[in-house]
Each structure stands twice: as C-alpha cells, then as structure tokens.
Amino acid sequence: MGQKKDNRAAGRHSAPAGRERPRREALKDNYYYEDRQFEDVSSYSSESRRQLDRAAVKRAKMAPQRQGPARRGRSAPKPKRRINAGAVIAWMVFLLVVGGVGLFIYMFSGLKVTDLGGDLAVSAGQAGVKNIAMFGVDSRDGENVGRSDAVMVLSIDSRSHTLKMSSFMRDSNVYIEGYGYDKLTHAYAYGGPELAVRTINQNFRLDITDYITVNFYDMTEIVDAFGGVELELTGEEMLEVNRNLFNLSREAENEGSKAPIRHDDYFTATDGTHNMIDGEFIGGKYLLNGAQAVAYSRIRYIGGDGERTSRQHEVLKGLLQRAKQRTVFSWPSIVHGVVPHCETSMDFMDMVKQVPFAFGHIKMESATFPGAAEGAYDAKNENGQYVMGFDEELMRENLHRFIYGDK
C-alpha cells in the first residue's frame, strides 16, 4: 500500500513520460505561474498587484507583434541638399536687373533723344543745381519745330530739395547769334533747341547743357496720363475754355482727324447750357482733363502775354502737384504716357541720376522774367515788331538770385 501512495504522489509532481515539464518564471513577489493559462493566484498579496503583473506579461508578449516584420524595399533616407546662398542671391540680382531694365524700356519707349552739339557758351554754375531748358511748341504735324510758345528753365536744387521754374516772356528782346536782337521765342524757330539753349546761356549767363521739348498740341494725352490737373478758374476763364474747345474741335475737323472734344468737356453755364457767347459761369477749383487744360493754356483774350504765360505755369505746376499725390507704383504708367510727346538731350544715365530727387517732399517755386523788378517795358524792334525790353544786368542778377539763392 505504501508503494501505491508513493506512485500517486509522484504523479502529482512529475510530468508524464515523454512530456517536457513547463517552465516557470519568477514574479517580482517570488510567486510562480506557468506559461499557459494556468496561474497560481492563491498567495498574491493583493488584487491590484496581480493585475499589474498580468498587464506587464501581456505587454511583453505583444511587443514583437506590434513591431511587425521589417519592411522590404524601403530605401534609406536621402541626405538633404544644402541651399547655395550665393546662387540664390545671384538669381535675385539677375531678376532685379532684368525687371529694372524692362521697366525702364516700358517707361521711356517712344522718347526722342537728340544730342546737343556745338558750343553752347556755357558759364560756370553752382554745385548741387541742375538747370534744364524746357520749351513748349505747338506743332500739329508731330515735329517739334517752329516757335516755342513757352520758354522755361527747370532748376533741380538738390541742396534744398526744391524744383524751381523760371519762365521767360516769349517776346523778350534778346540777342540771337547770327540774327541780332529779336524775340526770344524765335530762337527755337531759327535753330532748334541748340540755338535756343545757346541764346539763354549767352543772355542770362547760365550753364544749361540739356533740354526738354514738349509738344503742347499733344498736351491732351500728357494731362490725361496724370489723371487730370486741378486748377482754379474764374467764370470768365471758363467761358474762354468753352470757346477754345470749340476751336480745337473745328481745327481737328479741318485737318480730317477725329475731334478729341466730347460734349461733356464743355463747362455748363448758370442757365444750364454750354453758352459760348455771353454765358455766365461760377468760378472755382476744377479738375480739368487733357482737352480742357489745353483750351485753358490757349486763352489769349484775358490779360496779356504775361497772364498767358502764367496760365501755362499753372498747368505745369498742377501736373507736378498731381504727380506728388500719386503713388510710386503709378509713375511708370505716367511716364509711359508722357514721353512719346517729348524730346530731350538727356540719356538714360542722366535720367537715373535725377531719380533720388523724386523721392521725399519736393518744394516748388516759380517766377516769371522779366517783370517790373527787371525794368520791363514795351518797345518795338527795328522791324517794327512789338518786343519787351528790360534791364539786362538786373535781369541776370534777379534770375541768379532766384535759381541759386544768391544774395
């Protein structure tokens, strides 16, 4: 009987023949459980401890499954390419240069550049002041020939950031080389801009080497390129504008071209009509379009030549004031609309040099010569033509004082 008890005891603690006994693993609290579902939980110190141990074993079994087999065919990550800063900067400079050249070509396409040759009899000027002669002609054939209705000197004073306009009475009696004393306006007709510049330099001792000629017949397009010009008009001037608009329309019809005048261009009188005989108009500040500005500049029957010159001054000053009100981004379109109607001796680099002057606050001053301060008087030349005489020495002194600030 004792032998049978030993066999049963051995059967409880030993694996059957041919079967490997399952491995036991130690728990942290020195209790054991088997790999299969059997667990010895009779002696766990606490239920929470048992749950923690079971969770740790489950995580250990699941870790290889989550990782999964290694992916095949996956290439190694490529090294990042380093950006060449020098190449980027070079491309940016290239694009800026190309864009700048293209912009200037767009702005100045159609500009007629003519070199001033010969001896201009230039006198010494002053550093920081650039004098440019400006002539206004009224040519219907597109050629900048004939008398200059407007004769001015634009002085760019970079010292005080001031643009000064000196306007000369076109009937001023001056010496013209090869022709003797004659009206200043005739110099351009006799020898073009070269003789006109030489005449100004010789008579007024200036240092002008460049010029700009504007065809006032095309002033309509020029003013419209600026978006109009704001001017103060009297009722009498508004009546004359209407009359000149009608005359401009007739001129265009006689030349076989389409009249640039529209019905809305005429000012409306107090009776609601466009009366051009005896209409009454209410004066004030108006925004004039191109056709209206040309008609205003051509007023001849209010005042004399001095007032007509003053009105041309007002148009130019109004355009400059208009330009100051526009943003820098609108300048290319303005220049593009103006330059086809201009002629100049200034090349590309001469214009670039004046670009810094355009930035910032520009002051504007204007004066007309000769006047009472220069002893101006009416006279007749040897040909019996009306001219304006003046004291030449006073004229030079006052002109230099205005341009250079000489005392």
Image: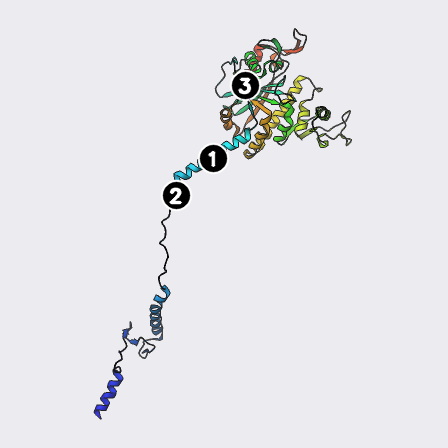
Label 2, label 3: how far apart the Cα atoms are: 55 Å
**What's the amino acid at mark 3?**
Ile
Q: Is any part of residue 236 visible from this angle?
A: no
Label 3, label 1: how far apart the Cα atoms are: 37 Å
Q: Position of residue 203 (x, y in %)?
A: 56, 11
**What's the amino acid at mark 2?**
Ile
> In the structure shown, which secondary structural element does the residue marked by tag 1 occupy?
helix
Q: Earlier in the sequence, mark 2 or mark 3?
A: 2
User: Extreme top residue here?
Assistant: 382
Q: Residue 269: which quarter of the image? A: top right
Tag in front: 2 or 3? 2
Q: Residue 386: which quarter of the image? A: top right
Q: Which mark is residue 96?
A: 1
Nearer to us in this view, 68 or 85 = 68
Residue 34 against residue 140 in the figure, above or below: below
User: Extreme left residue here?
Assistant: 3
Is disc 1 in contact with disc 2, using a CB cutoff of under 8 Å?
Answer: no
Q: Residue 42: which quarter of the image? A: bottom left
* Residue located at (34% from left, 75% from top): 46
Q: Which residue is mark 3?
A: 403
* Residue located at (43% from left, 37% from top): 91
Q: Which residue is mark 2?
A: 83
Nearer to us in this view, 18 or 51 = 18
Q: Is any part of residue 296 visible from this angle?
A: yes
